[in-house]
Image (cartoon, rainbow, N blue to C red):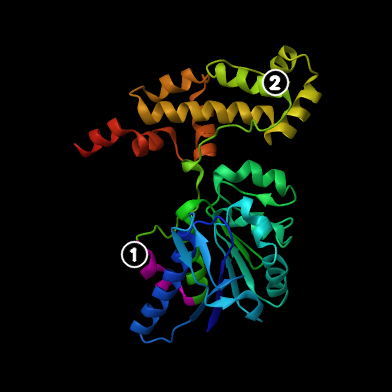
Amino acid sequence: MKHISIIVPQGECVLSSIIGPYKAFNAANVYLQQIGREPMFDLDLVGLSTEVKLYEGLFSIHPDTLMKDVQKTDLVIIPAAQPNSLPLNLDFIPWIKEQYKNGAEVASLCVGAFMLASTGLISGKKCATHWKAADAFRSMFPDVHLMPEKIITDENGSYSSGGAYSFLNLVLHLIEKYAGREVAIYLSKLLEVEIEREGQSKFAIFTGQKDHEDEPIKKAQQYIESNVDQKITVDQLAGIFLLSKRNFERRFKKATANTPVEYLQRVKMEAAKKSLESGRAHINEVMYSVGYSDSKAFRTMFKKVTGLSPIDYKRKYNRHTTVAVKN
C-alpha cells in the first residue's frame, strides 16, 4: 500500500489540482479491485488546519489529517498553490524535506513547483511549471534546471508537471510507475487524457519579460516587437542603444532571462503563430512576414519553439483549416 499525502495549502490554490489527484488515485483503487487486485493507494488530504477556504470562501476543504500527525508517507503531492501564498505555507517546507529524507517521493503540480523549489530538494535538478510562471520561477530559483517545455519531469524521487490540467499526465505517470501500465491506460481512457503527451510548448504564449528597470533593454524589446518583419542583428541593437555588444548581451539576459537572439526568435515565432492561427496566408507568406527567407530555418525554429511544424500548427489551431478538413 502506497501512502499518498496531498497537501492542502493555505491561501490561493487551484482547487482542481487537489481534487484531481484525489479522484484519480481513488479511481485506480476501484479499478484494481475490479481486476482482482488489492487497492494500492491510501490517500490523505494533509493540512495545517482543519478547514481551508478557497476562492474567497466560495469553496472550503476539510483536510482529514493535520501535517503534524503525519509521521511517514510515501509520496507528497504539492498542488498548484500560487507563489504569493508561499509565506502562508512555510511550515510545510521542513516537513516535506523530512519526508523526502525518510524515503518519500515528492511531486509538484503546475505552480506548486515554487513550493517544491523552496525546499531546496531540486537544486540542480530538472523541474517543470506553468509556462506563464517560467520567468518568475527562474528569477526566484536560478539554481533549478527549469524545463518549461516539459509536461513531466522525473528525477531522483522528485516529480513536477507543466501548467494547468497537465497535472493529470503526471498523475498517470505515477499510477503507471506504482500500479502498472494497464491501470494507467484504463485511467487515461476513463479521464480522457492522452497518456503520452510530453510537451506544453504548443500552448505557450511568449509575452516577453518586461518586469525590470533596465530602460534601454526595455526599449530594445519594444524595438524588436515593432520590427518583427525585419532581420535584426545583436550588433545592430547594441549600436542603436549605444551599448557594447558584450554589455548589451549581459544586460539583456539579466533583464529578460533570454539572450537577445533567443528573444528575437521567440518574438518572431509568436507573431508567426498568431498569423497561422487566424489568417489564410500560406506558410511561406507567414515566414516572410516575420523576417525569414530560408524555409528550412523557419520550420526548424518553429518546431523547436512549439513542438509542431508550421503546417501541423495551422491544422490544429486555424479555424478555416479545421473547417476545410472537416468538409
- Res 106 quadrant in image: bottom right
Magenta stretch: residue 184 in it?
Answer: yes
Q: Position of residue 90 (x, y in %)?
A: 70, 62
Residue at image mark 1: 189
The magenta segment is 179-191
Circles 1 and 2: CB atoms closer than 8 Å: no
Residue 297, above or below 131: above
Say which label, 1 or 2, has the lower sequence index.
1
Residue 67, numbered circle:
none
Question: What numbered label is drawn on residue 234?
Answer: 2
User: Residue at coordinates 79% horizontally, 17% vertically from top-left?
Assistant: 243
Residue 262 rendering spot, x and y as whole percentages: 64, 31
Residue at coordinates 39% horizontally, 81% vertically from top-left? 32
Magenta stretch containing residue 319, yes or no? no
Q: Is residue 303 above or below residue 37?
A: above
Q: Quadrant of residue 312?
A: top left
Looking at the image, which residue sits at the far front? 57
124 lies left or right of 311: right
Q: Which residue shows up at 33% across the image and 82% down it?
A: 34
168 displayed left or right of 267? left
By secondary structure, the bulk of the magenta-drawn segment is best described as helix
- At label 2, counting other C-alpha atoms closer than 10 Å, the crowd grade (few under 14, some 14-19, many 20 or more) is some
